[in-house]
Amino acid sequence: MDVPNGIKGVIVPILTPLTDDETVDTGSLRRLVNYLIDSGAHGIWAAGTTGEFAALPDAQRLLSIETVVDEVAGRVPVIGNISASATQLTVDLGLSVQEMGLAGIAATPPYYYPCAQDELLDHFRYIRDRVGLPLWIYNIPITVKTVVEPTTIATLAAEGTVAGIKDSSGAGELLAHLNVLCDTGNIDLLRFIGTVFRIGTTGAVGAHGVIPSIANLATAVASESWEAGEAGDVDTARRLQGKVAVASKVTKLAKGGGPNAATLSGMKSALKIMGIIDNDTLTRPLRGLTQEEKQQIPPILEELGLPF
């Protein structure tokens, strides 16, 4: 399928390595950037949900985005997430990243107060008008309590307000509806899905790429699975998708805490064992893995063929 602006494939929503005092570990972050790019990542999504953005002070969020852009040095596109709980707060962050060299910025609907669709139209138009960078809608209703409806997205895309969307709604019908609106309206919109188990079949559901958290660990497997799917090599895509499922075992090791903590702690602990990051610290109160739980990681890495 045609790709607006040439951005496609596996964009990794990069983790934010932290020190014990919950500040950004820039050295580990730089090593992680290089691991992702060397392993075939097609782009990086900085300071997103996987990057624990909502639990970090603005200065730390900006430091993480700036560090990623600097270390990437133009090798792949970087999208910086500037989401906040109000439109003006989002704009303030957007103005702070304006000169960093991002390929685009992303914003959710404001969170805490649920918004109506007319308010979302104003929200995204105001951001685009004030910040000026290519804007992506970050549609993740499970965390922000508001769905950006397909008609709203298509309206914003048709008028040139937004350039892309990360659809983490998990609702296939919403994406299908958006695809129809884009196709019948001849609307250019980068459509990416936050998925783990449809990496190799992305094109079949009308998306240009994926933004899967597990690609922080299984970067090569995810990228090769997407590439195989695009090439029509169904058998290879399925085989590699099976490896993605193996990698996802690290996100199921926690016997306590919530699902987000389990995912983040599993990947951070695995990357620490691999020597890519120095600490597996999470922002409180997210629960890290226990030593007993971490002992289950090396066999998973061995099954994936990852060094540790």
Image (tube, rainbow, N blue to C red):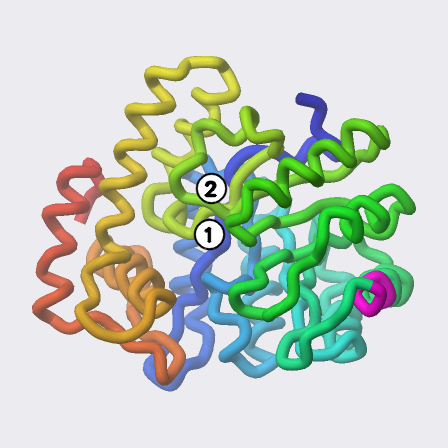
Q: Residue at x 71, y 48 (%)?
A: 103
Q: Reply above or below: 19 against 292.
A: below
Mark number displayed over residue 33: 1
Which residues, given as a range, are shown in magenta?
118-122
Q: Is 124 drawn above or below residue 302 in the view shown?
A: below
Please name the residue shown 65% across and 66% down the image: 146
- Does 167 sit left or right of 122 as displayed? left
75 part of magenta stretch? no
Residue 134 visible in this rendered orientation of the protein: no
Give coordinates of residue 263: x percent, y percent: 33, 61
Residue 258: give x, y in percent of width and height.
32, 72
Provide the secondary structure element on which disc 1 rests.
helix
Horizontal side, residue 145 vs residue 18: left or right:
right
Which of the numbered marks, if any, corresponds to residue 163? none
Point out residue 202 in the picture as x, y percentages from the top left corner. 52, 31
Which amino acid type is marked by label 1? Val
Where residue 250 appears, as percent x and y from the top left, is 23, 54
- For badge 2, the amino acid type reads Ile
Q: Mark 1 Cα within 10 Å, few/some/many (few <14, many 20+)?
A: many
User: Which residue in the structure is indicated by mark 2?
Assistant: 37
177 relative position to 248: left or right: right
* Measured Cα–Cα span from mark 1 to mark 2: 6 Å
Q: Secondary structure at mark 2?
A: helix
Residue nearest the viewer, comparing 292 with 178: 178
Q: Dot 2 surroundings within 10 Å: few (below 14), some, or many (20 or more)?
A: some
> Observer-nearest residue: 73 or 1?
1
Q: Residue at x 38, y 23 (%)?
A: 237
Relative depth, front residue between 234 and 40: 234
One can see residue 125 in this view: yes
- Main secondary structure along the magenta-highlighted residues: helix
Q: Are marks 1 and 2 in contact (CB under 8 Å)?
A: yes
Of residue 265 and residue 73, the one placed in the foreground of this image is 265
